[in-house]
Amino acid sequence: MPGTRIPTVDVGPWLSGDDPAARNRIAATVDRALQSAGFLLVTGHGVDPALRTGVRDAARGFFRLPEAAKRPYAVRVGGRGWLGPGAEANAYAEGVQTPPDLKESLSFAAEEPTGDPETDAEWFLPNTWPSAVPGLRPLTEAYLTQMRTLSDRLLELLAAALGCSLDFFTRHTRHPTWGFNINWYPGTDTVGEPEPGQFRIGPHTDFGTVTVLDRQQGKGGLQVFTEEGGWEDAPYDRDAFTVNIGDLMARWTGDRWRSGRHRVLPPPADAPAEELMSLVYFYECDPHTRVESVPAPLGRVAYEPVDAHSYLRAKLDAIGVG
């Protein structure tokens, strides 16, 4: 069952640091989970559930606007603004041609400049906030502050799980990039009947370091793929974040850990009006971090070193439609 491959981990003892034995057990559980599915559920994280609800409620006010009101915020994949219907097909990253994903997104990203004009122009531009939903900005910025703090603590946990010093990853997150997508998955009354092979999000792996996902349960929800079990519904806990690693982290660990392959099912035939919304935080490293595979016996494959952000840009470019 997926629950054995995707455990729920209470990271409260890890964050408090009071019990070294508990911290060691948590690190070992994380290592096993990331070797199997690349996913785990995390409770005890301390993020206010009311804040998560507030972001969703404010974003829903934007997504339900007429298309003409949203169009001025339209961007391409990797931009800051509205990704409208048909903008993205995540299965393209696997080389599979599918119809576009059945979703809309509001996308935000790191904006505090580094002082390097070329880097800032690509990765640290100002965000665009829809004027029709003024409450979205303060709620989202508060949420993102908590996501940054949590993600660094999770990277420390991942370093311990790998058997490395706690700053093995966070030494590269002094001025990191990140992306944040609020994904809206409306029902068939908005997106129409799914075409063959069409998903809310097509099968893919995330591209970067670590993803922290706040999702809702639904019939047309998240599925995770493993060699042992094939496609299975991801376990759900309303209090938990779903955490997975991406391709860059898999390379970094020399494929000790798997980049978690996943998809989001289309609106279900027996619940066509189902509407879900996910808050997806993609945490990365400092621009131009050189990512080298850890050596054996930790690592299993010695990949060529890559520039983290050249790698990410190529991946993002691959999933845009048109």
Image (tube, helix red, strand yellow):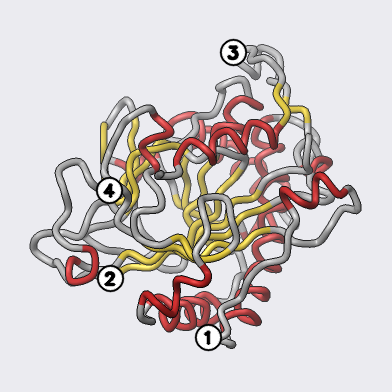
Q: Bin the neighbour count of mark 1 within 10 Å (Cα to Cα): few under 14, some 14-19, many 20 and up.
A: few
Q: Which residue is mark 3?
A: 301
Residue 260 horizontal side relative to residue 79, left or right: left
Residue type at mark 4 is Asp
Q: Which residue is mark 4?
A: 233
Residue 192 horizontal side relative to residue 280, left or right: left
Residue visible at 32% across and 25% down? 227
Q: Which mark is residue 133?
A: 1
Q: Which residue is mark 2?
A: 275
Q: CA distance from mark 1 to mark 4?
A: 33 Å
Q: Bin the neighbour count of mark 4 within 10 Å (Cα to Cα): few under 14, some 14-19, many 20 and up.
A: many
Q: Name which of mark 4 and mark 3 comes first in the sequence.
A: 4
Q: Secondary structure at mark 2?
A: loop
Q: Secondary structure at mark 3?
A: loop
Q: Which mark is residue 59?
A: none
Residue visible at 62% across and 38% down? 313
Q: Secondary structure at mark 1?
A: loop
Q: Name which of mark 4 and mark 2 comes first in the sequence.
A: 4
Point out the image quarter for the C terminus.
Answer: top left
| Above or below, 51 relative to 78 | below
Marks 4/3 in contact by CB < 8 Å: the verdict is: no
Q: CA distance from mark 4 to mark 2?
A: 17 Å
| Above or below, 317 relative to 217 | above
